[in-house]
Amino acid sequence: MQTQMDLFGNEVPIEQAYAKAPRETIKSRWRKMYGFRQDETCGHCKYCVYHERDRRWYKCMLMGVSSSEATDIRLKDPACSRFEDYI
């Protein structure tokens, strides 16, 4: 097994030294804060809005609307605990 020194002078396996940490996304942080409901989807929530230019994309008004794809949501995503039915 090959090892490499890390920033703190410890020897770690090469696989561990080059392993990427899972990236936390805006949606994953949102789910950690508010949880989610398996019985509902974002597409049925009153806070789900869409924008359209050359294609259609969906945003959550509670999560925030930006020009970034990072805040896009999918209609089939499990809804957060702040879900409110639009009917």
Image (cartoon, rainbow, N blue to C red):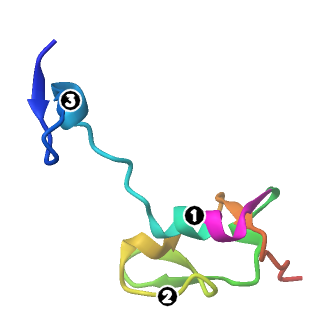
Query: Which-is-in-front pick, marks 1 and 2?
Result: 2
Amino acid at dot 3? Val
User: Which residue sits furthest right?
Assistant: 87
Q: Which of the two labelled residues, at mark 1 and mark 2, occupies the earlier sequence position?
A: 2
| Secondary structure under the numbered disc 3 in the rendered image | strand
User: Which residue sits furthest top?
Assistant: 1
Q: 9 or 6: nearer the eye?
A: 9
User: At which x and y percent is residue 60?
Assistant: 60, 80
What is the quadrant of the N terminus in the image? top left
> Is 35 a magenta residue?
yes
Distance in Å between CA atoms under marks 2 and 3: 42 Å
Is residue 87 shown left or right of residue 71? Answer: right
Is residue 34 shown left or right of residue 18? Answer: right
Q: Using the image, tell me which numbered label, if any, was put on residue 74.
A: 1
| Secondary structure under the numbered disc 1 in the rendered image | loop
Q: Residue at x 73, y 61 (%)?
A: 36
Amino acid at dot 1? Arg
> Is 62 a magenta residue?
no
Circle 2 residue? 65
The magenta stretch is 31-37
What is the quadrant of the C terminus in the image? bottom right
Q: Residues within 10 Å of mark 3 (few under 14, many from 20)?
A: some
Circle 3 residue? 12
User: At which x and y percent is residue 27?
Assistant: 53, 66
Pointers 2 and 3 in contact (CB under 8 A)? no
| Secondary structure under the numbered disc 2 in the rendered image | loop
Q: Residue at x 36, y 79 (%)?
A: 68
